[in-house]
């Protein structure tokens, strides 16, 4: 029953607007960081693949 006293639901629903704006900003930022990580990961995977091919080619030659 203690939880009921800590919850606050405002009568004026306009008080929710700043929190929704903050939520949207954080979701956009999280999505952008996620995309950045995915792009960086793909680039590093391509570089690793090229390095593996280079090592394999040099191993065949020797």
Image (cartoon, rainbow, N blue to C red):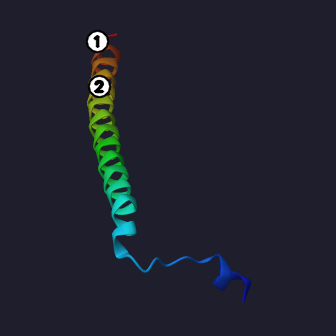
Nearest to N terminus: mark 2 or mark 1: 2
> Label 2's element?
helix
Instruction: Work out whether residue 17 or residue 25 is closer to the camera in this orientation and state it.
Output: 17
Per the rendering, the mark at residue 47 is 2
Farthest residue toward the top? 62
Q: Position of residue 51 (x, y in %)?
A: 32, 21
Disc 2 versus disc 1: distance between alpha carbons?
21 Å
Left or right for 62, reference 4? left
State which quadrant residue 4 falls in. Answer: bottom right
Q: Quadrant of the N terminus?
A: bottom right
Q: From what the image shows, is residue 58 above or below residue 46? A: above
Identify residue for label 1: 61
Q: From what the image shows, is residue 20 above or below residue 12? A: above
Q: From what the image shows, is residue 33 above or below residue 18? A: above
State which quadrant residue 62 falls in. Answer: top left
Q: Residue at x 29, y 25 (%)?
A: 47
Q: Nearer the viewer, mark 2 or mark 1?
A: 2
């Amino acid at each position: 029953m203690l939880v009921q006293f800590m919850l606050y639901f405002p009568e004026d629903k306009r008080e929710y607007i700043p929190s929704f704006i903050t939520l949207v900003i954080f979701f956009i930022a999280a999505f952008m960081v996620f995309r950045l990580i995915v792009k960086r990961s793909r680039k590093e995977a391509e570089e690793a693949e090229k390095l593996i091919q280079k090592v394999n080619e040099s191993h065949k030659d020797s």
